[in-house]
Structures are given as structure tokens and as C-alpha cells.
Image (cartoon, rainbow, N blue to C red):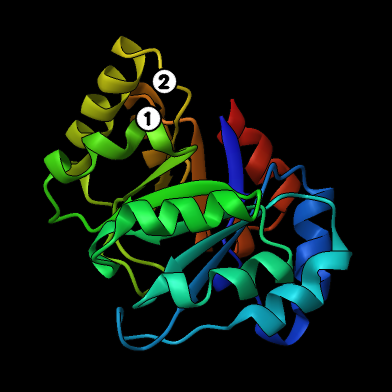
Amino acid sequence: MKIAPSMLACNFAEMGKEIIKTDKAGADLVHMDIMDGHFVPNISFGPGVVKSLRNMTSLPFDVHLMISNPQKYINEFANAGADIITFHIESTLNPIDTIKKIRLLNKNVGISFRPSTDLTKIFPFLPLIDVILVMTVEPGFGGQKFMTSQLTKIEKLKSAITSNNLKCLIEVDGGINFDTIKLVKNAGADICVAGTSLFKSDNMYDAIKKMKT
């Protein structure tokens, strides 16, 4: 299991120090939630912040675009240092064009979806992407309660990926803690995003180590 601490839960006044802490604590990726106040009701930060943090760590930047018209901003986040760029299937009328644009910039492609979105809208894109991000909370806010109803979706995605010999990884975001990570691992997840449970822990190194076991 790979662990991606979510910077949404860090101390924004100390983001540089916080990202170094995640690196030293054994994180595999750094997850960055980009929110525009339109696609989701909250606002986080933009490509300028991502760029300012890029030289603080060599960990891959896992950039999750919870924004409307994501294709308009792909260049900016790619230039800022994103390694994975994930957009929401509900945020664009042309998912294929968005995938192609990310690919042209030599970045890994991710697609995410709201808990209410039907999986039939996702399956056709699995052969074209690197990561499928399953939201186990409603996107837009940290600290929400894990939705067990989404475990079935993780299982179905894992089955589709395995049966078709695809390389797409399953990432899970929302309400991940020491208990819920066991559920998503058993369901077939490869990467877990954790925010509050890591940044509010007494020792992030021990917390990440426990999540990986």
C-alpha cells in the first residue's frame, strides 16, 4: 500500500516544513487537492503554491483537480511540477481530450468521480489512464466520515482492472484512518490518501508505517 499525505490537512502557514515532514516520514506521494469554489464549495490553492513546494521534496506530486474546466489549467499544473494530474469525470464534457492533453505533457493521468457517479461512466477510460481515484467522501472538504458504500466500487474496479490485465492503480481518498485503510486494502486499493489522520498524529512516521502494514 502506498500512502499519499494530503496537504489539505497540513498547516498552511508551514507548508514547506510540512512537506519535508511527509518526506522524512516515509510517504510515497504528496497529494494536493486543488479546489476552485465552483466545482466544489471550498477553495484551496493553485499552481503557484505547487511550484513553490516543488523543490522541497523529490516525492511525486499527486495533483487532484477538483475544478471546473480542468483542461484550461493542465499546462499550469504540469509546469508547476505535477507528476500525476487527476481530473473529475463530472468536470468536463471531453474526458478523452483532457486525457490526451495530460499525456502530451508527459504526465501520468488520473480520473476521479463523486460517490454518486455511476461506475459505467468510468469503465471505458480505465485502459487510458494510470490512476482511478475513488472518493469515499463528498469532494471539497477534509475530515469527513468514510463512506463504506464505496467499497463495492473499489472491488468492481479491481475486478475490471485485473480481468483486463490493465495497469491502472486504484487510489482512495476520504476518511482514511487506521481502521478504514484495512477495508480499502481488502477491497483492492493500491494507494491511500490520508490527511487528518496523518497531520494530526503525534508521530507521522509511525502513523504511515502503521498504515502500510
> Three-letter amino acid code at disc 1?
Pro
Mark 2 residue element = loop
Quadrant occupied by the N terminus: top right
From the viewer's perspective, is 149 left or right of 11?
A: left
Whole-percent x, y for residue 12 in the image: 66, 83
Whole-percent x, y for residue 20 in the image: 83, 62
Residue drawn 78% across the image and 48% down it: 25
List the residue tagged with mark 2. 166
> Three-letter amino acid code at disc 2?
Leu
Give 199 or 72, whichever is nearer the viewer.
72
Give 121 or 195, whichever is nearer the viewer.
121
Quadrant occupied by the C terminus: top right
Using a 10 Å C-alpha cutoff, classify the residue at mark 1 as few (fewer than 14 neighbours), some (14 to 19) or many (20 or more): few
The residues bearing labels 2 and 1 have C-alpha atoms spaced at a distance of 6 Å
Whole-percent x, y for residue 137 in the image: 28, 59
Rendered view: 67 above or below 181: below
Mark 1 residue element = helix
Q: Are marks 2 and 1 in contact (CB under 8 Å)?
A: yes
Q: Quadrant of residue 141?
A: bottom left
Residue drawn 68% across the image and 35% down it: 209
Residue 127: mark in rendering: 1
Rendered view: 204 above or below 36: above
On the question of residue 65 being in view, the answer is yes
Residue drawn 41% across the image and 31% down it: 189
